[in-house]
Amino acid sequence: MAGPQSISLVLLLPLLLPLGPIWHAAAQRCPQTCICDNSRRHVACRHQNLTEVPNAIPELTQRLDLRGNVLRVIPPAAFQDLPYLTHLDLRHCQVELVAEGAFRGLGRLLLLNLASNRLSALPQEALDGLGSLRRLELEGNLLEELRPGTFGALGALATLNLAHNALVYLPPMAFQGLVRARWLQLSHNALSVLAPEALAGLPALRRLSLHHNELQSLPGLALSQARGLARLELGHNPFTYAGEEDGLALPGLRELRLEHGALQALDPRAFAHCPRLHTLDLRGNQLDALLPPQGPGQLRRLRLQGNPLWCGCRARPLLEWLARARVRSDGACWGPRRLRGEALEALRPWDLRCPGAGALEDEEEELAAARPRAPAGAPKEEAGAARPCPRACVCVPESRHSGCEARGLRAVPRGFPNDTQLLDLRRNHFPVVPRAAFQGLGRLVSLHLQHCGITELEAGALAGLGSLIYLYLSDNGLSGLSAAALEGAPRLGYLYLERNRFLQVPGAALGALPSLFSLHLQDNAVDRLAPGDLAGGRALRWLYLSGNRLTQVSPGALGPAQELEKLHLDRNQLPEVPTEALEGLPALLELQLSGNPLRALQEGAFRPVGHSLQHLFLNSSGLEQISPGAFLGLGPQLQSLYLQKNQLQALPPLPGLRQLELIDLSGNPFHCDCQLLPLHRWLTGLNLRVGATCATPPSARGQRVKAAAAVFDACPGGAARKAKRTPAPRRGAQRTPRKRRQHGADKVSQRAAAGWP
C-alpha cells in the first residue's frame, strides 16, 4: 500500500510539473546585450552602455549584474518584473538619482550594490520594499548627508557600507531601523561631528569603522550608544587628546584602533569604562609618554610603534605595568640618546637609571631640547583665551571648528579663536595666501582651502601651524610650492593637491615636511617622475599620481621613499611597467597601474616588489599579451589581481599565485581553444569567481572559461586529466541522503546572504 508521502506527492505532481517549463520558457528570453546562465539563474549585462534596465530579462532571474553601464536614474519600480532577485549589482553605472520606490517588489533581495556611483542624496523612501536585504553597498558615492529614516525599511540588514563619501555630520537617529546591523562602515568621509544620538537604535552593532575622517575629539557619548560594539576603528583622525571626560563607555569592546592620528596625550582613565578591552592600537601618533591604562583589566596587546616614546624615568610605571600585567607591546624609544632605538619590550625598569631628582631634571632638560620648538615670532597663547569670531564666519566652541565656506571672501580672515582645530575656508577667492596668514592658530589640526583660486603660497604662509596634520589645497591653480611656503608645519602628514596645475612633483618643498605620510597629486599635468622629485619624502607611505600625463618613471625616482606602501599611477600614459623604478621599495603593498596603455607585460615585470605586494591593479590597460614569467617573483603575499577590461585572448597559468583571494578576468575576449587548456586547468583549481568568459569561437561564446568542459575535454589530454581528477564512485557507495542535501542547500543560502560566493 502506498504511504502518506507517496499519496501527497501524487497529488502535488500536477502542480509541480509546470514549473520546469515555466523557467525553461523564461530562460529562452535573454537580452542581446547580456549573458544568461540558465542553470544558475544569473544574468550579466556588464559594460554595455545601457541607459535603462533591459526589458527581456527572465522573470525567475536571481542574480543580475549591470555593472559599468550609464543608467544615471533608477526610476520607480525599475525591477518589478524580477521578483525573485537575490543579488543586484549596479556598480559604476553613473547613478545620480534613486527614485522613491525604485526597488519595490524586490522582497527577496539579499545584496544591493550601488558602490562607485554619483549619488549625492537618498530620498526618504528610496530603499522601501527591501525587507530581506542583508548587505547594502554605497561606497564611493558623493553622499553629503543622511536623513533620519532613510534606512528604516531595512530591518534585516547586517552590513551597511558608506565609506568614501562626503559625509560631514551624522544627525540623531541616522540609522534608525537597522536593528540587526552588525557592521557599519563610515571610513574615508569628512565626518567632524556626531550627534549624541547618531548611533542610537543599533542594538546588534559589533563593528564600527570611522577611520580616515575629521573627528577633532573622541565622540565618546555618541559611540557609547552602540553598547554592543566589539571592534571600533578610529585611526587617521586628527584629535590630539582622549580622556575619561570624553565619556567612552563600551562594556563589550575588545579592540580599539587609534593608529596614525594626532594623539599627544592620553589620560590613564580614557578607557576606564571599557573593561573587556583586549587590544589597543596607538601606532603612529605623537605620544612621548604614556601612563598605565586604568580600567581595562583584560588588555593584552598595546601597539605603540611609530610614537616618539621618551624612555626616561617617567616611563618606569609603564614598563612595570607591562611586565606585571603581561601585556605584549611594540614600539621603540626615541630618547634619551643612550636608549634611542631600543625596543620597548626589551627594556626593564632598572634600565632607565633613575637614582634621584638630579637625574630626572637632566632628563627633562634633554626632553625639552628634543621637542620641536614653536616658530620664531609665534605668539604665546594663554590657556582658555579666545578671540572673537570673524564677522563672516561661524565658530563653534564645543567642537573647536571655525568655518567661512562660500562667503565670497577675498582674503584670509583673521581673528579666529586661538583653540581652533579645524578651519574651513573652502569656495572663497584669494589667489595668494600671504605670510603668517594663520597667525595665532597654533592648535590647528585641519585646514581646508579647496576651490579658493589659489595660485601661490608665499614664504611663511603656514608659519606657526605646529599642530597641523591635514592640509587641503585641492581644486586650485597651483603650479608649484616652495619649501619656504610649507615651513612652520613640521607635523603635516596629509597634503592634498589634486586638480591643480603641477607639471612636476614639488620635491624640494617636501623637504620642509619631515612627517609627510600621504601626498595626493591626482589629476594634475605631471609628465615624468625623475630622480630627486621625492628627495624630501623619506617618511612618505602613500603616493597618489592618478590621472596625470606620466610617460616615464625613471629608475631611482622612487628610491627616497623607502617606506612607500601605496603607489597609484593609474590613468596615465605609461607604455610599460616601470620595473626598474620599483627597486628599493621593500614595503610596497598596493600598486595601481590601471588605465595606462601597457599592451604587454614583460618577464619579471614586478620582481622588485614580489615579496611585499598584496594588491595589483592592471585593469583597462589595453593588455593583449602577458609573458609566462610576467608575474615571476609574486607569490605568497599577493591577495588580489585585477586584469578585467583588457584585450587578452590568452593568459598563461599562474601557479605561483597560491594565496589569491580575488582575481578578476572579466571583460577580456578569451579565445577558448586547446592553447587555453593550461589556464582552464589552473582556474578549475581555484575556489574563486574570476569572470573569464569565452568570446571565440562562436560555439563557445558566453561560456565561462573555468566551466567550458565541452571545449577543453576535446583537447589532447583534456578528458584524461579530468578523469584522473574525478575518480569514479566506489561500488556500493551510498547516495547522499535527501536531508543532508537539504542541509547543504541551507548553508549555501546562508552564505549567499553575506554576498557573492
Image (cartoon, rainbow, N blue to C red):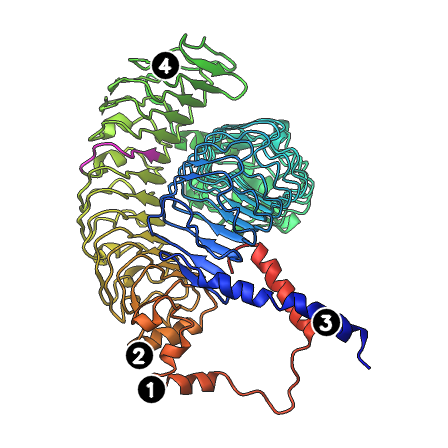
- Viewer-side residue, 538 vs 146: 146
Looking at the image, the residue that sits furthest to the bottom is 731
Tag 2 near tag 4, CB within 8 Å: no
The residue identified by callout 3 is 9
> Image point 61% across, 41% down: which residue?
154
The residue identified by callout 4 is 407
Mark 4 is on which residue type?
Arg
Residue 94: x and y in percent read 37, 41
**Magenta-drawn segment:** 495-503
Report how far apart the C-alphas of labels 3 and 1 lie in the structure.
Answer: 47 Å
Q: Is residue 744 magenta?
A: no
Q: Which label's residue is closer to the chain start, 1 or 4?
A: 4
Magenta region, main secondary structure: loop
The residue identified by callout 2 is 674
Secondary structure category for the residue under label 3: helix
Tag 1 near tag 2, CB within 8 Å: yes
Report how far apart the C-alphas of labels 1 and 2 lie in the structure.
Answer: 8 Å
Report how far apart the C-alphas of labels 3 and 2 lie in the structure.
Answer: 47 Å
Q: Which label's residue is closer to the chain start, 3 or 2?
A: 3
The residue identified by callout 1 is 716
Mark 2 is on which residue type?
Cys
